[in-house]
Amino acid sequence: MRYFFIIFSLLIIIPLALFAIEKENAIYVLPRGPAYSHIGLGAPKLENVYLKFGNRVKIEEEYSHGSIKWYLCSKGPVHFYLPDAFVVKETGGVEYDLKGNIPIGKEVVDKWHALPLEYKPTDLIPVPKEYRAYGYESRKLLLRKEAVEVFIRLIENAEKDGVNIRILSAFRDTRYQSYLYFNSIRRYGIFQNEVAKPGHSEHQLGTTCDLTTSEIGSTLSKDFEYTAAYQWLQDHIIQSGIFLTYTKLKGKAIGYMYEPWHYRYWGKEKWEFFREKYGLFLSR
């Protein structure tokens, strides 16, 4: 029994590097923070290493420690440990159009697939003031040109039916996302599922909006689900190529909480695909 305990203790931290994992580059995504001398959030922090957003590190080895993945990293001659939640592996193989944008509907981004941190669409334009949520009129909200036109048309069609819908949040660059992510970790812990890691947020696409309505005081709230605006959206968004990303079922499957306000424009081709494949179902 004693020998079993010793073996079990040794296996608590399993070096994945034994399986010849290729070294990768990663980017630190918190606004700032320390590096650890050993594995574990309670481990001592290195006094001579202080990281900030955008710092590149090299992953030397990977370790599984409980339910947290840890990396042995290096920056120059210095070695240290970081949890997976603090870094994003550099992304390759992304296809851009001639203007440097990822084609709408072709972007792959979720909890497991990241966009390049430096990616920012070149065709972002301001959302007109009259379509911004109450209290956000002076805030600069940006969307890609095609997405702006579609969301404006959606809002205007809702107005014709007597339903108030407004845009509360739109494009976010990764530096701003970093602050939101960091604050959520501080509030809820490393396993938080409220805010996506920088590079993993659909808001970086410039085709995604958080929507609200005057029915709930133009706030960001799960109560949005119980409004006439939410019901109207469920009946009309798909015809515009817009989809609710984090549904109750899908949200649990992909590791994010349910967000009844989070809508992504996938493009006209997506709607055409759904209409051709599920036309009879959609007509009902």
Image (spheres, helix red, strand yellow):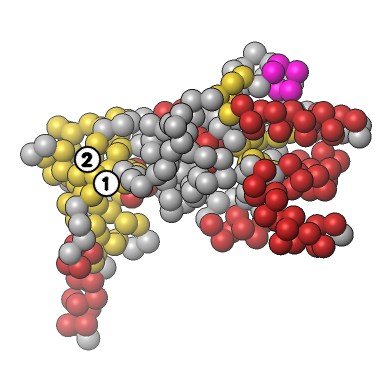
Tag on residue 243? Answer: none
Q: What residue appears at the point 26 percent right and 33 percent down from the top-left corner?
A: 55
Q: Is residue 156 above or below residue 239?
A: above
Counting from the top left corner in percent of width and height, residue 142 is at 58, 24
Query: What amino acid is found at the position of numbered circle 1 in the picture?
Result: Leu
Determine crowd level at label 2: few under 14, some 14-19, many 20+ residues with C-alpha closer than 10 A: many
Q: Main secondary structure of the magenta part?
A: helix
Q: What residue appears at the point 70 percent right and 49 percent down from the top-left corner?
A: 271
What residue occupies the far front of the structure in this picture?
Answer: 98
Residues tagged 1 and 2 counted as in contact (Cβ below 8 A): yes
Query: Image check: 281 left or right of 1?
Result: right
Q: Is residue 130 magenta?
A: yes
Counting from the top left corner in percent of width and height, residue 222 is at 71, 43
Decide which of 53, 90 is in the foreground and name it: 90
Query: Image check: 228 left or right of 76?
Result: right
Counting from the top left corner in percent of width and height, residue 281 is at 81, 62
Q: Is residue 180 visible?
A: no
Q: Quadrant of residue 170?
A: top right
| Mark 2, residue position | 57
Counting from the top left corner in percent of width and height, residue 131 is at 74, 23
Q: What residue appears at the point 75 percent right and 61 percent down from the top-left corner?
A: 278
Q: Is residue 242 visible?
A: yes
Q: Is residue 169 above or below residue 1?
A: above
In the rendered view of the protein, which quadrant contains the C terminus? bottom right
| Mark 1, residue position | 82
Q: Is residue 98 magenta?
A: no
As measured in the structure, the alpha-carbon distance from the residue carrying label 1 to the one carrying label 2 is 10 Å
Tag 1, which secondary structure?
strand
Q: Which residues are magenta?
A: 128-132
Query: Image check: 189 left or right of 143?
Result: left
Q: What residue appears at the point 70 percent right and 56 percent down from the top-left corner?
A: 274
Query: What amino acid is found at the position of numbered circle 2 in the picture?
Result: Val
